[in-house]
Image (spheres, rainbow, N blue to C red):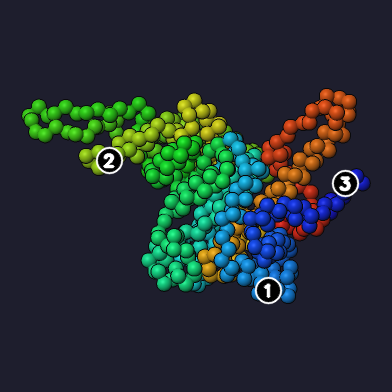
Amino acid sequence: MPRRRSPQEKPIDWAQELTDWMAPFQAALGHNGRRRWGPVYLQGLLGPGDRKSVQPMAARVAPDDHEQLHHFIATSAWDPTPLETELAHEAQRLVGGPDAVLIIDDTALLKQGKHSVGVARQYAGQVGKVTNCQALVSLTVARGEVPVPVALRLFLPKEWTRSPARLLRVGVPAATRAFRTKGTIALAELDRVLAAGVQCGTVLADAGYGSSANFRQALTDRQLIWAVGIGGPQKVFPAHVRLRTPRAHPTGGRPRRHPVPSHISRHAEALLETARWQSLSWRVGTRGPLRAKFAAVRVRVADGPRAANRQRLPGALVWLVGEWRASGERKYYLTNHPAGTPLRTLAATIKARWVCEQGHQQLKEELGLDHFEGRSWLGLHHHALFTMLAFTFLQHHRLRTLAGKKNSRRRAATPADAPGGSSGAPHRHDPTGPAALSGLSRPHHLPPKTVENVAK
């Protein structure tokens, strides 16, 4: 049933709001032709229709200019960097700050055939198996469960990087033709968005990234607080482990040059077997509080230099956190949060990663991230960038609407001559707090399915 507007409520001018919001992105596009077609493509993604590839969108928003819209997104060699920088600025404005999290993950675009850039048989999380797909490394900034995507970069499997002719055919830039792991791509994108001014308190990643000692060390080298997934077999030492130089054998022989740990390393899952597990709730879901058991101990990860026997020596002192789900499944994490951090804080931070997965789903189902039918590197990244812009605009509207509702309620509840009223100091509010999770009104000139599903 459509929501009734109060007599004092004015209709929202969506065309004007979108135009105003797009102004800095228009400037970043530069060329007049791109400034013309950028908003048209964005309107196609935001508009109605189950298919968000170029041809059906052009039929709805530019029926006489299909070729020009296709050229803009798929074949025009414009540099997305200025637009990506503006997107980072907008993400910082909306949700960035010391209490934000930056989530590193990847998402799969299921594909048929073998000619689209980067397509190969590889693992796709959405179907839980190896299948034909493209894999995009993603970075998402989130605060108060409000996500804003800031990076989507294609991963090229080795079967692609070993074929120069194939890379040339789909227009992969020369600088990105060498093989790079997903972790390497993620770190490069992390450096880019941090340089653009995005601030966060913690970097989160799943075990696909967190199991790499080099990846964890790279985050530490950047002086970042991080919390990442690992596998249960990850080797760790007790926090009180010490390195000692063994004495020479009494019968003679060459003295050892490498130190020896005072304790042996154990699997993370084994070390937590005797830990004290505590039932905690970290968020209220649609069916009530979400709960699981958690345990945490201080450990030194076995990711230091290699000893003479090729075993890893103790490395960084961190938290090892275990999660015991109601299904019986156990998950394990490492985080370099300071000593003394409460278990509840560690659990809530680790579980904050879920908003990234929700964002991926909405980018695909509502804004057509996986609908692009071109084969080129540039076309795919242009399309992915505009789906992120569409998502970010909806989050901008969501927070703006909620802030307006809060201000209206305060004005109605507070007399003008009372402290904090219209004649007093303005109220401060946090539009990304828990209240931002509900109550988005339906816009009058955009499709209800797209706006309500993406912004709820």
Q: Is residue 416 left or right of residue 60?
A: right
- Say what amino acid the circle numbered 3 marks: Glu
- Say what amino acid the circle numbered 1 marks: His
Mark 2 or 1: in front is: 1
User: Is 70 in front, or is 47?
Assistant: 70
Secondary structure, mark 1, is: helix
Q: Are marks 2 and 1 in contact (CB under 8 Å)?
A: no
Task: Residue 306: give its label.
Answer: 2
Residue 218 placement (x, y as % from top left): 42, 42
Task: Residue 9: give its label.
Answer: 3
Residue 123 placement (x, y as % from top left): 47, 59
Secondary structure, mark 2, is: loop
Q: Farthest residue toward the left?
A: 251
Residue that carries the numbered disc 1 in the rendered image: 66
Residue 325 placement (x, y as % from top left): 52, 41
User: Rounded to the nearest whole Å, what is the CA distance between mark 3 and mark 1?
Assistant: 38 Å
Q: Tag 1 or tag 3, which sits nearer the N-term?
A: 3
- Say what amino acid the circle numbered 2 marks: Arg
Q: Residue at x 73, y 49 (%)?
A: 397
User: Rounded to the nearest whole Å, what is the CA distance between mark 3 and mark 2?
Assistant: 68 Å
Q: Is residue 198 left or right of residue 301?
A: right
Crowding near the residue tagged with mark 3, few <14, some 14–19, many ≥20 C-alpha atoms within 10 Å: few
